[in-house]
Image (cartoon, rainbow, N blue to C red):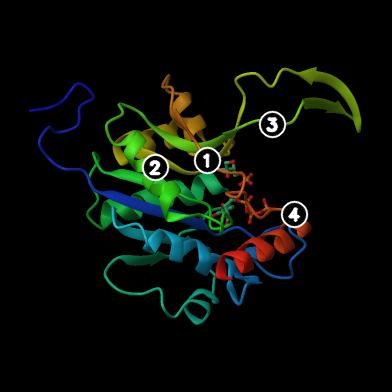
Amino acid sequence: MMSQNNYTVGVQPRCYALVPAAGIGSRSGAEGPKQYVALAGRPMIAHTLSALARVPALAATLVVLAPDDDLFEAALPEFKGDTCWVARFGGASRAETVANGLAELLARGAQPHDWVLVHDAARCLLRPAWVERLISACESDEVGGLLAQPLADTLKASNQGRVAATISRAEKWAAQTPQMFRLGLLMPALAHAGESITDEASAVEALGHSPLLVECSIENFKVTWPEDFALAERLLQSRLA
Ligand SMILES: Nc1ccn([C@@H]2O[C@H](COP(=O)(O)OP(=O)(O)OP(=O)(O)O)[C@@H](O)[C@H]2O)c(=O)n1
Ligand SMILES: C[C@](O)(CO)[C@H](O)COP(=O)(O)O
């Protein structure tokens, strides 16, 4: 028997985390891939994976690395076991890395009705409670959703470094991750959207759906620019203290 949205009724879906970690961090100014930069004594990605490991609802976490990544196992010897999966199928874009990761989840036994929580390796300030909030909000939703934050600043469009227009910030949110969708929805959504999209939600939106916005904290920022490392370091140190 199938439900309204074509997922089998009566089968409890599992939740998987998928962490795209195949980027090079070109905006970060770091010498190597930014996910291996040490923050509070550990590589950035170790903080990310350790937060996900503390979410009991996750059946497993798949990390998708670049094919030539030779740093991961040495940097994270503790990431092993039945629920910690590594694949070297990273692509040229984040969207391609995620699409390859979804295929790997399917190959490892995930089902179309299972949920996938895609989370950037570079959002290393993640807290397990935020992931649990997202899961609670989305698990009974038809579409799925994402962590996000309503915009606080006034928004400007630019043209050659000068303001071209002021854009209303009403009803505008900054998208974060994790972004949580059913495997059976996200795979065709990404195939349809192509590589220009920058998050999973936009692929799902392009199919005509409206993902749920689940409010999160500014602390869940993505380490992107050189100055972000010092901020992440301070926040991680303050949590240790
Ligand atoms: N081809 C790519 C590009 C990005 N990512 C991952 O997607 C996440 C978010 O991307 P971003 O912050 O842009 O990371 P980079 O692509 O590494 O950085 P930049 O855009 O500055 O080069 C990161 O965890 C990154 O490793 C990926 O898995 N595969
Ligand atoms: C997915 C994301 O983190 C949501 O804000 C963001 O879109 C990633 O974009 P990037 O171009 O890979 O930095």
Q: Is residue 93 left or right of residue 30?
A: left
Question: Is there a contact, CB below 8 Å, between mark 2 and mark 1?
Answer: yes
Of mark 2 and mark 4, the one earlier in the sequence is: 2
> In this rendering, which labeled residue sits more in front, label 2 or label 4?
2
Q: Nearer the viewer, residue 25 or 239?
A: 239
Tell me the distance, in whole angstroms, between the alpha carbons under discs 1 and 3: 13 Å
For residue 133, the mark is 2
Residue that carries the numbered disc 4 in the rendered image:
225
Residue 33, image x and y in percent?
A: 64, 66
Q: Quadrant of the C terminus?
A: bottom right
Tell me the distance, in whole angstroms, between the alpha carbons under discs 2 and 3: 22 Å
Residue that carries the numbered disc 3 in the rendered image:
152
Kindly identify the residue that appears in the image at 53 percent across and 52 percent down: 120
Residue 109 lies, with reference to residue 84, above or below; the image says above
Of mark 4 and mark 3, the one earlier in the sequence is: 3
Tell me the distance, in whole angstroms, between the alpha carbons under discs 4 and 3: 20 Å
* Element type at mark 1: loop
Question: Is there a contact, CB below 8 Å, between mark 1 and mark 4?
Answer: no
Q: Amino acid at mark 4?
A: Trp
Q: Quadrant of residue 184?
A: top left
> In this rendering, which labeled residue sits more in front, label 4 or label 3?
3
Q: Amino acid at mark 2?
A: Arg
Kindly identify the residue that appears in the image at 12 percent across and 32 percent down: 9
Of mark 1 and mark 4, the one earlier in the sequence is: 1
Residue 212 lies, with reference to residue 199, above or below; the image says above
* Element type at mark 3: loop
Q: Quadrant of residue 182?
A: top left
Residue that carries the numbered disc 1 in the rendered image:
216
Q: Quadrant of residue 161?
A: top right
